[in-house]
Amino acid sequence: MIVTLPDGSERSYPSGVTGLEIAASIGKKLTQAALAITIDGKLRDLDAPVTANASVSIVTFDSAEGKEIFWHSSSHLMAHAIEELFDGAKFGAGPAIEQGFYYDIACEHRFNEDDLRQIEAKMLEISTRDLVITREEMPREQAIDYFANTRKDPYKVEILEDTLKEVATVSVYHQDGFADLCSGPHLPSTGKVKAVLLTNISSSYWRGDSSRETMQRIYGITFPSDKLLKEHVARLDEARKRDHRKLGAELGLFMLTPEVGSGLPIWLPNGAIIRNELETFLKGEQRKRGYVPVYTPHIGNIELYKRSGHYPYYSDSQFPPLTYKDETGREEQYLLKPMNCPHHHLIYSSSLRSYRELPIRLTEFGTVYRHEQSGELNGLVRARGFTQDDSHIYCRPDQLVDEICNAIDLTRFVFNTLGFDDVETRLSLHDPENLAKYGGTVEVWEQAEKDVKEAADRMGIKYFIGIGEASFYGPKIDFIVRDAIGRKWQLGTVQVDYVMPERFDLTYIGSDGQKHRPVVIHRAPFGSMERFIGVLIEHTAGNFPLWLAPVQAVVLPIAEDVHGYAREVWQKLHEAGIRAELDLRSEKIGKKIREAEVSKIPCMLVIGRNEQEAGEVSLRRHRKGDEGSFGVDELIAKLREEIDRRS
RNA sequence: GCUGAUGUAGCUCAGUCGGUAGAGCACUUCCUUGGUAAGGAAGAGGUCAUCGGUUCAAGUCCGAUCAUCAGCUCCA
């Protein structure tokens, strides 16, 4: 029997050889590291026999599959430990996740931090017992009986009776007295787990359904060595330093205070500079691309949102209406604007439109207010008041795909300029199982999704499909990036809408002299200024490119005798439109430099007697160090160019 | 909204068994005038998140509220 290894080499083995035996025949290290195998691409336990010619690879912790198996087995190990420590704990779902694993547990006992340390110790103890993990296949009916009567775990029974009701044979993994329903594969033994960190306890709903009971979810991560755990902890520390909430306070970018309200960020001067630069950048780019600016009020009559359909769909996540009564008792209700589109639609229909003037691209940095659930609020990335770089493009059906492409192109240009290279793109389509969620007809959705796909394909973007991620009025292309701790956030978006034109009876006069329905594209490359800047802070760790830095340069005179010259240099920078500060304190140059470095100011202009005599400045760049001396005008031209290039 | 945790000076944190509140950094003043990541001294700074309760006495114990954090649920 011939086995082909990943490097293309072929080896012959007797039929029935196991993954472990293959690994052993290759090397001692690999035998140690082996967690599972793939046989013709299919993951199997390490003791699974290979019975025919096949391509085989040994799965280790270094691969994504290896980590998943390792962490999935670790969730079983944790459940095993909890079962030994706490009587009556019942287990729900316990999968591997991107960074570790969790298990949902139903238990009378409320778990706390001390319990986590105790469970960690028990897990390591079970690991040292090096229990063999074995797979047992059984008919589903037998498994139901086993989990109902032997394991007495009602959650596993529910999974067997519901989720797995079509499956005839299921597998159960055993390790000593512990057993779990699982398709596998798993580690060969518990001894592979050498380092354990249980990170937090939270709650979850059984099967993610808020009408079902809540369970306690314990998150953790494990590694095959202490060294890898230490590296992981170091990465977490690094991520914490990049947290935009921490950096936002340290760098004076924004603040949040209950005196204003939860989820309502205040932009401090330094943060306002960044936001303003980004707005100027996008406005300039949009002017080139034929957008026209508009402004609309922060509140609007509630009837407007009833008409758009937003109010009934999202009434639970809006601030309650403001009610106004005049002397005659007539009542009017206003809503804090939860989105900008209805206003823009009214602008469109404020005059008769000809097919010749389409597409019309209305743009506004529109501030909106949404009453997000309190538990969802998160610094700038999830706020209750935020500003969208919102535009609506009104076009003819024959222009639609081109316009979507233009919007994608603009979004990509924005992301490239800001250095986001790790962006995922999702085609957010509707869920045919849940049509009640959406407006419009089936035909309209089919057309819209076809157009979106065509545009995405034409632009050559790599995307994945998100069923059920569409908004109620149309499919979207969403651009998603990760924050410092790996959470994903949607930033830019391009959305097609055939529904609003109907609701607002938007029309244009075609070449045939008849009224026609335009199509609307909603698009926002930044998405929300707040969220975008929040993610940008984490992405850059607060080390903004020169064009965005709140303070671009600081002039640092070494002693008082050059203060006059330092002031001249500062004045020239200021006149050249460079945001510069002048540090005239009687501190040593080392201290001034340290403080500028800590404040992440990109350019430090050190000035002493030598520079004064030569009419120069000595340039030190943030995190780079001394870059030598330049003539003042030469330096200003150099910085000016870097700023204007936005590099 | 739900579950859990947290809340002491501008920031980071200490505060024992319930007995009148502490450090470092930052800040202010003074001294110091220096060459690429912290010069020295002094001073000022607190309704211990808020409200209520227990107690002779509460930062400390109990309850409620608010906010924040992690996760769940939601996201136009």
Image (spheres, coloured by chain):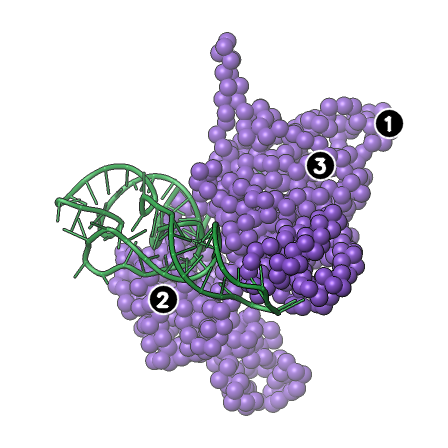
Task: Determine whether, in the image, residue A353 is placed left or right of residue B46.
Answer: right
Q: From the top left corner, tell me how far across and down residue A636 is, in percent.
A: 76, 56
Instruction: Tell me the residue at 41%/46% (across/down).
Output: A210
Q: Nearer the viewer, residue A380 or B30?
A: B30
Q: Sequence order check: which comes first, mark 1 or mark 2?
A: 2
Residue marked by disc 1: A512
Q: Tell me, by letter, which chain the rendering colours green.
A: B
- Label 2: element kind: helix
Residue marked by disc 2: A79
**In the rendered structure, the residue with mark 1 lies on which chain?**
A
Q: Nearer the viewer, mark 3 or mark 1?
A: 3
Quadrant into which the N terminus of chain A falls: bottom right
Is residue A373 depicted above or below A77 in this figure?
A: above
What hue does chain A carry in this figure? purple
Q: From the top left corner, tell me how far across and down residue A583 is, in percent.
A: 60, 55
Q: Sequence order check: which comes first, mark 3 or mark 1?
A: 3
**In the rendered structure, the residue with mark 2 lies on which chain?**
A
| Distance between mark 2 and mark 3 Cα atoms | 54 Å
